[in-house]
Image: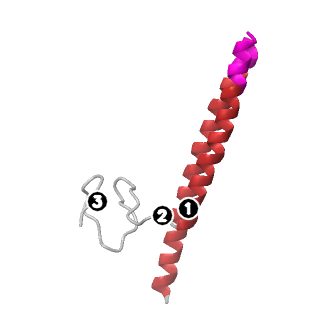
Amino acid sequence: MNCPKCGYEIKEDWISCPKCGLSLEPPTPEAIVGQMVTKILGGLVESGFIEERTEAEREKDLKRAQIAEVGRRVGKDIENLISEAITAYDYQERIRRKKEKTKK
């Protein structure tokens, strides 16, 4: 069996490709929900900053508009970091569960 992303030869019981890191198992339901909530909340935060920036530009308050844009970008970065943390946690949980199964 080969990795669908990089073509590296992988074993059937592996949960990720050692070469490219692609997860070979679907994410857990908890991880899917976590990702969805993160995207929704991130979108709400972003839209709030966009609205603030637009209003500030309309009022010709460029400093406030710049601050709102920085806030939007930081919010987007934080959203991506949270999403990556959820993925990493989910990956570690799957490894832990797999080890528990092999001990039994």
Q: Residue at x 69, y 22 (%)?
A: 53
Amino acid at circle 1:
Ala
Q: Quadrant of residue 44?
A: top right
Q: Residue at x 59, y 45 (%)?
A: 81
Q: Residue at x 57, y 54 (%)?
A: 35
Magenta stretch encompasses residue 47:
no
| Mark 3 or mark 1, whichever is nearer to me | 1
- Does residue 84 appear to the left or right of 69 in the view shown? left
Colour theme: secondary structure
- Does residue 93 appear to the left or right of 53 in the view shown? left
Q: Residues within 10 Å of mark 3 (few under 14, many from 20)?
A: some
Task: Please identify the dominant SS of the magenta region.
Answer: helix
Question: Residue 37: x and y, percent?
Answer: 62, 53
Q: Which residue is mark 2?
A: 27
Magenta stretch encompasses residue 64:
yes
Q: Quadrant of the N terminus?
A: bottom left
In terms of secondary structure, where does tag 3 sit? loop
Q: Which mark is residue 31?
A: 1
- Tell me which label, 3 or 2, sits earlier in the chain: 3
Q: Which residues are magenta?
A: 52-66
Q: Which mark is residue 13?
A: none
Question: Residue 66: x and y, percent?
Answer: 69, 18
Amino acid at circle 3:
Cys
